[in-house]
Amino acid sequence: MSQLVDEKAFYTGHVKWFSMEKGYGFICKDGSDDGKSGGASFGRGDKDVFVHITSLQRSRIDNLREGQRVRYQLDESNGKVSAVNLEVLSE
């Protein structure tokens, strides 16, 4: 079952990378180590946040590019956290 981690909380960050071919990518959450550690986490810590192509489609976003600033909420499904309700803040 999918549900928002906190319905009122929004987070900001920048796109670390996103692949249309793979259908997913990662957002580096503001205040983190900018993703240079190489590791990714699906949790709520300071690591990268997973984003799936369906979240882009639901948010009416065509694509994400490396470095774009985004605003998002966190959704938890099957113990994994991902970015949802995305909004591009800068090109």
Image (cartoon, rainbow, N blue to C red):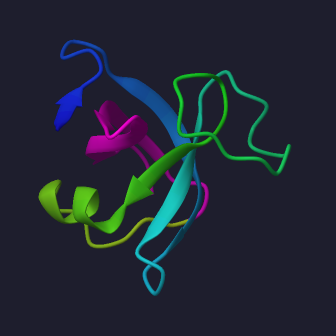
Q: Is residue 33 above or below residue 80?
A: above
User: Residue at 49% of width from left, 49% of height from top?
Assistant: 50
User: Residue at 24% of width from left, 64% of height from top?
Assistant: 54
Residue 35 belongs to the span the image colors magenta = no
User: Residue at 71% of width from left, 27% of height from top?
Assistant: 32
Tell me: 43 left or right of 90.
right
- Return the residue nearer the eye: 71 or 51: 51
Question: Where's the N terminus, which quadrant?
Answer: top left
The single residue placed furthest to the bottom in the displayed view is: 21
- Return the residue nearer the eye: 62 or 48: 48
Q: Is residue 76 above or below residue 84?
A: above
Q: Is residue 22 above or below residue 45?
A: below
Q: Where residue 66 sits: x, y (%)?
A: 59, 63
Residue 80 belongs to the span the image colors magenta = yes
Tell me: 2 left or right of 70.
left
Query: Residue 9: which quarter of the image?
Result: top left
Question: Where's the C terminus, which quadrant?
Answer: bottom left
Q: Which residues are drawn in magenta?
A: 66-91
Q: Where residue 14 sits: x, y (%)?
A: 56, 44
The secondary structure that dominates the magenta segment is: strand
Query: Residue 79: which quarter of the image?
Result: top left
The single residue placed furthest to the right in the displayed view is: 37
User: Residue at 36% of width from left, 35% of height from top?
Assistant: 71
Q: Where residue 12 sits: x, y (%)?
A: 46, 30
Q: Where residue 39 sits: x, y (%)?
A: 77, 47
